[in-house]
Amino acid sequence: MIAIPSDRLDAILARHDIVTATLSAGESDAESFVQLSRELSDLDSVVGAIHAFRAAESALRGVEEMIEEGDPEMRALAAEEKPEAEAARDAAARALQLMLLPKDAADEKSAILEVRAGTGGDEAALFAGDLFRMYSRYADLKGWRVEVISESPGTMGGYREVVAEVKGRGVFARMKFESGAHRVQRVPDTETQGRIHTSAATVAVLPEAEEVDIQVNESDLKIDTMRAQGAGGQHVNKTESAIRITHVPSGIVIFVQEERSQHKNRARAMALLRAKLYDQERSQKDAARAADRKSQVGSGDRSERIRTYNFPQGRVTDHRINLTLYKLEEVIAGTALDEVVDALITEHQAALLAAEGMA
C-alpha cells in the first residue's frame, strides 16, 4: 500500500473547516458563494474518506497492539482479525487515493450531446438514431433529463445530426468517454443479399457551462432571427422564432429552431454557445484534451473508431481498452452501457494513479 502523507490530509481537513466557516458567516458575494458551495460539496466526500481511512488505520493499530501486548488468548484472536483489518485499511486507502486524484472540474456538470451520421449514407443516419436512443434510455435510467436542442432527421429515419442537453448531476463524468467515432456492422433492412454493411457515426460530449464558468460579451455576438424551416407544425414559417447566434471572435455559429418561442430558442442557443466556448477554453488549458472538436470526434470515417457494434455476433467492442461484451442488445438498450462506462472510468483512474505515483 502506498503511504498517503498525513500532512496533506490535515491540510484538506483544515480547508474544509475554513470553507464551512466562510459559508456559515454568509458574507460571500453570489459568485464566491457558488464557488465555495461547489468546493464544499467536493470536500465533503473527501473528508468522509479521510475519516474512514483513519478509523481503519486506528482499528488496525489496535489489533497490532493486542498481538504485541495482549495475553495469549487475546493475541490469538487478534492474529485472526488482522487480515480483515488490513483488508479494510487497504480498501479505505484505495478509496481515498481515488478521491485525491486530480479532478476534472467539469465532471459534475450536465452535458451537451451531439450525434452525427458519418460514413454510410442512410444506414449511418439510422445508426446515429440508435445511438441517440441508447443515450436517451441510459439517461432515463440515471434519472437525467434529455432535451433536444436541434435535429436534422435522416431521409429513411434516424438523424443526420441531433444535438441535445443531458441535464443532471455528474452527467459529464460518465458520458465524456463516449466522444469519438462509433462503428456499426449489420445487415440493413434494405439489403436484399444479406450482406453486412459497415457505417459510422460520431459522438461529441461537451460539459454544459454556466454563466459563472464562461462570460460571453454581448458585443461579441451577431444575432439573427428568422422563420423556422422544415417540418415542425403550423407555426413554421409564420413567426421569426428561429435564432442564429454568431460568436464573432471564435467564429462559432449556433442555430436553434426547435421551440416556438424565440426567447426559448435564444436561451438554448446561448447554452450551446457557452458549452462550446467552455470546451474550447478547456482544450487550450489541458494539452491532454483535443485541440479542437474535429480531433475529438474524427472525420466520421470507418477507420477512426473508439467502439464497434457488431450485430451478427451480438458483440460490442471498445477498442481503447480492448473490452468486448456479448451484450449488444442490452448495451444498445442502455441497460448494459454502465459496464462499458465503468471499465473506461477504472482504466482512466488507473492511469491517473500511475501518473501520481500511487498505483
Image: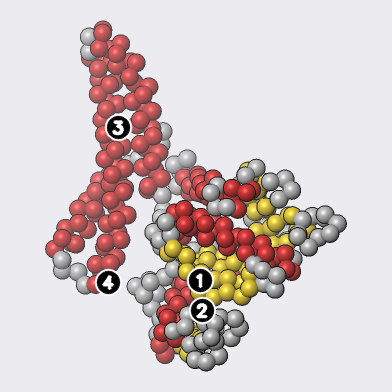
Q: Secondary structure at mark 4?
A: helix
What crowding class fits label 3: few (fewer than 14 Cα within 10 Å), some (14-19), or many (20 or more)?
Answer: many
Q: Earlier in the sequence, mark 2 or mark 1?
A: 1
Q: Earlier in the sequence, mark 3 or mark 4?
A: 4
Q: Secondary structure at mark 2?
A: loop
Distance in Å between CA atoms under marks 2 and 3: 54 Å
State left or right for residue 292 relative to residue 154. left
Question: Which residue was labeled with disc 2?
Answer: 258
Q: Earlier in the sequence, mark 4 or mark 2?
A: 4
State left or right for residue 110 relative to residue 7. right
Q: Residue 81 occupies which quadrant of the picture?
A: top left
Q: Say which of 339 and 16 sits in front.
A: 339
Q: How is the image coloured?
A: secondary structure
Q: Position of residue 218 (x, y in %)?
A: 40, 87
Residue 169 against residue 227 in the figure, above or below: above
Amino acid type shown at disc 1: Val
State left or right for residue 237 relative to residue 15. right
Mark 3 in CB contact with mark 4 (< 8 angstroms): no
Question: Which residue was labeled with disc 3?
Answer: 56
Q: Earlier in the sequence, mark 1 or mark 4?
A: 4
Q: Say which of 165 and 6 sits in front.
A: 165
Amino acid type shown at disc 3: Ala
Residue at image point 45% right, 77% down: 268
Q: Position of residue 284 (x, y in %)?
A: 50, 69
Q: Position of residue 14 (x, y in %)?
A: 22, 51
Mark 2 in CB contact with mark 1 (< 8 angstroms): yes
Distance in Å between CA atoms under marks 3 and 4: 38 Å
Question: Which residue was labeled with disc 1?
Answer: 148
Mark 2 in CB contact with mark 3 (< 8 angstroms): no
Amino acid type shown at disc 4: Glu
Amino acid type shown at disc 2: Glu
Question: Which residue was labeled with disc 4?
Answer: 31
